[in-house]
Image (spheres, helix red, strand yellow):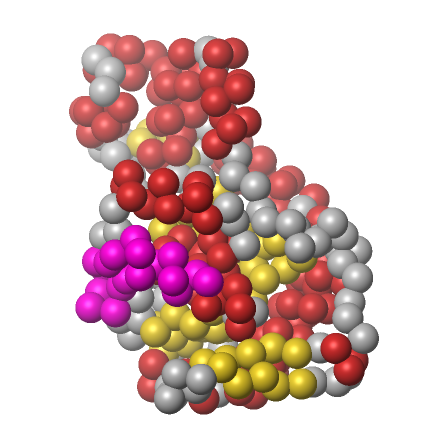
Amino acid sequence: MPKRKSPDSQDQATSRYSIRAVERTLRLLSILSDGKRRTLTELSEAIGLSSSTTFRILATLERNRYVERDASGYYQLGLACLELAQTYHMGSDIRQAALPELEKLRDETRETVHLAVLDKMEVVYIEKLSGLCAVQVMSSRVGGRLPAYCTGLGKVLLAYSDPQLVRAHFEQTGLFPYTTATIRNVDDLMRHLEEVRRQGYALDRGEHEAEVRCVAAPIFDGTGEVVAAISVAGPAGRMEPLAERMDLIERTLRAARTISSRLGHRELRPEQETYSRISRDGHEEKTFEGR
């Protein structure tokens, strides 16, 4: 099965066609995409430009409704960004294929479900359906980004990426310890990703948010490439013991297979459908599941 390719080589090939003014404009929009309002000074410092240059870019964006400035002088994304996001959201083939199964999975588990893709070694959320239970502890949001190495979705997507590119990236950037459960060593991460690929799903035991637990599974397209991942996430109190929640793992894998088939992925015959998990004593256990 082919591994997901990194966009790095494409980025290098097209970098010579980059237009500096456009790059600066997009960088400003990217900074504001976290939803936080910022002043002109904060934005000029973040982008490394003078206040006058930054102001001219912001004024152009404001005139075209891509940013808004309130009475206090704080900037945030404008309505034109929302319109673009909605257009992408409604036109996404992956999202359209996944949405019915995400709704079903949310209703069955009563927990929050996500759909995400990998971009520059980060998870980008393209759908989130909040759980039906009262207690919700997650900071995830549609359009938001999180590091891939410390989320269930991200680890699934990294597991099917080129391991040399994954290693090179994180050896350069490092692994920030968000919680005591975060993987902090690149060698440990690579071994863990091998395990994720072998068993066909990933678990997040509070590696980015200490009280969040997650089960994630890959989405394949018609070429056999992993193009997205889905997850079921909830608070530790409801999700633990996570490794023993085989009902939850099975539901997540089943939903992922159905979405993959809608994207043209050829499914295995029932007698061939297997997944594995690592038992507490360290042995790999195979489980067979028909339809």
Q: Quadrant of residue 40?
A: top left
Horizontally, residue 82 falls left or right of residue 37, namely right
Residue drawn at (43%, 61%), measured in percent from left and top?
193
* Residue 114: % across, % down: 52, 63
* Residue 262 seen anywhere in this rendered image of the structure: no
Between residue 16 and residue 105, name the one nearer to us.
16
Residue drawn at (36%, 78%), measured in percent from left and top?
235
Between residue 1 and residue 258, name the one nearer to us.
1
**Quarter that holds the C terminus:** bottom right
Q: Is residue 191 magenta?
A: yes
**Quarter that holds the N terminus:** bottom right
Q: Above or below — where is 262 with respect to 134?
A: above
Q: Quadrant of residue 101?
A: bottom right
* Residue 56: % across, % down: 34, 12
How many numbered marks does the figure carry?
0
Per the rendered image, the range of residues in magenta is 177-194
Horizontally, residue 91 falls left or right of residue 27, namely right
Q: Above or below — where is 285 with respect to 120?
A: below
Horizontally, residue 20 falls left or right of residue 266, namely left
Q: Above or below — where is 288 with respect to 90?
A: below
Q: Is residue 169 magenta?
A: no
Residue drawn at (30%, 53%), measured in percent from left and top?
186
